Amino acid sequence: AERMAAVKASELLNEGGDFSEVVTQVQAYIDHLKIFFSLQSLTNLANNGRINKTVAKLAGVLKINVLGWANEEGKIEQLGKARGAKRAYQSLVDILAEHNFNSKKVVIDHANNEKGALALKNLIQAKYPDCQIEIGTCTALCSFYAEKGGLMVGCTVNGEK
């Protein structure tokens, strides 16, 4: 989502917008950006006390993917779970629709899971053929929490859920 906001700011500045106008427009854009995720491992979240270690271990053994988002307050919130990656990716597409995804742009960052990112991209494009989708890799703190196999999805939505 940060990358999406930076690109938007760059586009507006390149179009000749004045700084204060660009700030206002980018803030309005940020208000419509959402971040969703699918995690295949919860180990680092458990090690940092964000979730119960037993729950994390059980989810790993059962191959349960946890689906969630950064809610309006910026806190991580679970939106669902799915057994297996394919179900998780389809569930993410459903979650996008439930949260008023406007079908314009998606950025999918993966943690050593390009195959999963491409599978999610294909599912999104099947439902939203005109959607612009960019795939990248998780870095820094996102890669730490996403762990191997995790996907982070930034997108624009229409208003609030």
Image (cartoon, helix red, strand yellow):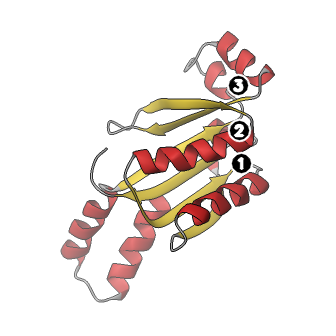
Q: Amino acid at mark 3?
A: Thr
Residue 65 versus residue 110 in the image, above or below = above
Q: Are marks 2 and 3 in contact (CB under 8 Å)?
A: yes
Residue placed most toward the observer, 89 or 77: 89
Which dot marks residue 43? Answer: 3
- Which mark sits nearer the N-terminus, 2 or 1? 1
Q: Provide residue 75's location: percent of width, then percent of height.
A: 41, 32
Which dot marks residue 111? Answer: 1
- Which mark sits nearer the N-terminus, 3 or 1? 3
Q: Provide residue 59's location: percent of width, then percent of height.
A: 71, 21
Is 142 on the left-hand or right-hand side of 13? right
Classify mark 3: helix, strand or loop: helix
Is 72 on the left-hand or right-hand side of 114? left
Residues under labels 2 and 1: Cα distance? 6 Å
At label 3, counting other C-alpha atoms closer than 10 Å, the crowd grade (few under 14, some 14-19, many 20 or more) is many
- Which mark sits nearer the N-terminus, 2 or 3? 3
Residue 78 versus residue 58 in the image, above or below = below
Whether residue 1 can be seen here: no
* Quadrant hosting residue 121: bottom right
According to the image, label 2 marks what residue?
147
